[in-house]
Amino acid sequence: MIKLVANGIYDAVVGDVTIGYNRSTLVDFTQKYMESGIIIIGIAGNPNVSPWTLFIQPFELKLWGTILAVFACTGLLVCYLESDDHPELKEGGTVHRIGNILWFIVEALILLDRDYFRRTASRAAMIAWLFFAVLLGASYTAGLSSFLTFNNLNPSSLNILSLRNTTQKIGYRKGSIVKDIISRRFNFSDDRLVPLRCADDFSDYLKNDSITKILDELPYVNIMFSEKKFLDCQYVVDDELTQQGFGFGFNKNRNLAKNFSKALTELSENGCLKNLTSCYNMDKESQCSSDDSSSNKVPWKSAITIFVPLLFSLGVCVGTKYLKPYFQRKHDDTNMRPVIEDDSSVHLCRPTTPSRYAQEDVYRNEVGIMKLM
């Protein structure tokens, strides 16, 4: 279209025409009405993950610290509840006692030896701990599986210079200025550039490994990432390689570019251009950046609800240990009542069981019969 305008077949070309240096020698461009830099799109991957730290990747470090703290608190609480029935926890020197406590925690919380639990409160605490461990283990397994599937442990470099030194094929939008810029500026051979027509082609070619990266202009990328299939951050984008824009092109002999530039300036100042870009989803930037290495980690705020049932149960167990003696004494006091015998003497510490009441009734009946006789 640019060449047709330059040859005088058409007077102007309007629409999403990228302003470029070579094109500006052929036609007169207006000022740009929309930013249009070239960016790289690739399958999400995290090259910074070490195989030695893979097991800690599903959770955030803050969440790991919370898990260790809850584990230690639960173990110490069980030791406290069982300390009266396990004298070895109180015997020996400090180092010996610490060793016994640590081994007791391992035996109780990890090996789940039931011989260690002799108190009802500690058994209730262990039930809550098992429930917590099952939920935490399921979350960890799901997070690790998602992390391995999402990242594939394969580097996904979006550096244009590193791509230039490989033989990987790169897709671009057919008819765009991308091919000319990449070939001229970064010396990419034409046999490595694959022309594609739409976002569906981009997705299909990436998934079947026909191409490894996509080079496209920012407005088209924003439209593509506004679609539902691209909202799951399966793809990542890098920063812009170039700073360009869209404009209108006119034949150099017509002298119309200046007047249209003034009109575009007025539309930009009154907000009309911004409303148009918002209407067609051209201003919605992708939320999936190439350096987002924590997108698959389970955040601390999302997992904190798992700790609530366990902490509540531990609080109930501690309260039970302190309140049980109080209720026991109160129960014993209600079972202690004065019993008045026939000789009017008061006995304060005689149990008031049903059998005792029966014996007293028989005794009173016998005394009454003797008085009648």
Image (cartoon, helix red, strand yellow):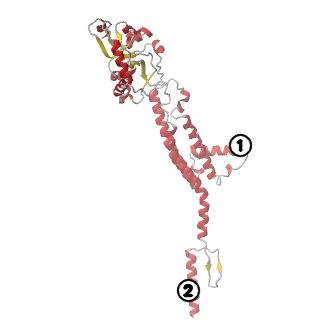
Q: Position of residue 158 (x, y in %)?
A: 46, 19
197 or 258, which is in the foreground? 258
Q: Secondary structure at mark 2?
A: helix
Circles 1 and 2: CB distance less than 8 Å?
no
Q: Which residue is mark 2?
A: 365
* Quadrant of the rendered image containing residue 238: top left
- Residue 118 in sight here: no
The C terminus - image quarter: bottom right
The N terminus - image quarter: top left
Q: Is residue 347 above or below residue 199?
A: below
Horizontal relation, residue 63 to residue 188: left or right = right
Q: Position of residue 308 (x, y in %)?
A: 52, 46
Horizontal relation, residue 94 to residue 31: left or right = right
Q: Secondary structure at mark 1?
A: helix
Q: Which mark, residue 95?
A: 1
142 or 25, which is in the foreground? 25
Point 59% across, 51% down: residue: 115
Q: Amino acid at mark 2?
A: Asn
Q: Which residue occupies the extreme right position in the image?
A: 93
N-terminal-most mark, 1 or 2:
1
Q: Amino acid at mark 1?
A: Val
282 or 194, which is in the foreground? 282
Q: Which mark, residue 369?
A: none
Q: Position of residue 340 (x, y in %)?
A: 62, 81
